[in-house]
Amino acid sequence: MHCAQPPDQPLALGIDLGSSGLRLVVIEPGGQILAEEAATYPAPFTDPEGWRLGLVRICARLPDALRSAIGALAVDGTSGTLLLCRSDGSLLPDRLGHALPYHLACPQQAEAARQLAGAGADASPAAGASGSLARALQLLAELPGSDPDGLLLRHQADWLMGWLLGDWRWGEEGNNLRLGWDLERRNWSGSLAAQSWSHALPQIRPSGADLGHLAPSAARTLGLPRACRVVAGSTDANAGVLAADPAPGDGITVLGTTLVLKQFTPEPIRGPGISCHRVAGRWLVGGASNAGGGVLRRFFTDQQIRELSRQIDPSRPSGLNLRPLPRRGERFPEDDPDLEPRLEPRPVSDALYLQALLEGLAVLEQRGWQRLAELGAPKVHRVISLGGGARNPQWRRIRQQRLGVPVLNRPRLSAALGMARLAATALPAP
């Protein structure tokens, strides 16, 4: 878009650090979208410097008049992507300078994570091989001499938020549930606070908290006002829910690189692989599979997916029974680090193979909603689809047949939009 004159009111910027790239959205206080940008990371996903540099580059695409009017921003990130850094946010050398990604299970640390999570650990998102706590223990175990003095454990969104503030003390509560933060008690669960490395844990602030102004260096680098407020964000899946603003009885499915299910519940729900957040004063529960659109891109380009999808007749099942995991290990609806993918047999027809993969993802989604219901979540009467996969009408029909409820595709409701709406809460009243 072109914007020659600065807007007459402060604007909100939402930043989404997704698993496949970055996206940002600028909105007016009333919610109207003024600009959207998307880009891939300029470095491997596990390299935190790629997150920062990616933000710098994508922000530079915005017109100067828009950037000069940004009054508040918020960042979301992939839940569970964790790294070690120094107290000033700088990265460690070699392999320790990279994050452990959200999908990486650490089965060798699973039992220790359960013990640290304390009573009721089996129902804690920090317990088991797939939680951030297991990844934290793995990072600490790889330190030379195992000395974490002066080091911090930070999730993706929290590390970038630290760079924006010039202060890496903070962590947003939703991003740290899988590290062991207890939302109900508002403290670290089990014996985490008593560990010799507990100083590495962040000071937790709730989603939506105003953490202060941009650091001068970040403001200069991004071309944003020094007075811009930094608001504690959320996870990428929660940000999508904020964008969708679901009604009672609605479930949210994010069809991105991974498959994520979310719904509001009257009470918190716990279980292996289950996330339970507090968003806008309400309990939001869900789970994230390792399977998703990332598996499709292993076999087909986005253009091929669009073209092949047109050849699919959802009323005629493929007859195949695939489990489209990208690798061994699953988080939800089963928390099983040893669960194997099932990507064969592959038929001669590419369209039939794509259909079978989409059907396999629909089965995982159905089992996910069943799992949440078994744990006490209300029955879902409608599903709102977000993410890139929500642009596929054939997949929507396959899912609707499998789920037995209406499925609505809303691909423009991005996680970045949800963060922009959250950031707008820190703007001054008009």
Image (cartoon, rainbow, N blue to C red):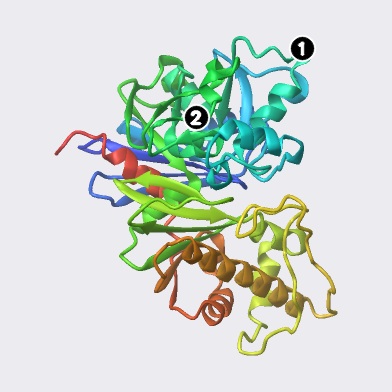
64 vs 90: above or below: below
Residue placed at 69% from the left, 54% from the top? 330
Residue for badge 1? 145
Res. 162 mark: none
Q: How many marks?
A: 2
> Is residue 404 in view from this perspective?
yes
Residue 367 position within the rendered picture, expressed as x and y whole percent measured from the top left: 58, 68
38 lies above or below 428: below
Name which residue type carries label 1.
Answer: Gly
- Residue at point 77%, 63% (across, down): 299
The quadrant holding residue 258 is: bottom right
**Is label 2 in a helix, a strand or a loop?**
helix
The residue most toward the left is 430
In the image shown, does 351 or 11 lie closer to the viewer? 351
| Left or right relative to 339: residue 128 | left
Q: Position of residue 404 (x, y in %)?
A: 49, 81
The residue located at (74%, 56%) in the rendering is: 326
Q: Is residue 233 left or right of residue 178?
A: left
| Label 1 SS | helix
N-terminal of the pair, mark 2 or mark 1, is: 1
Q: Which residue is mark 2?
A: 158
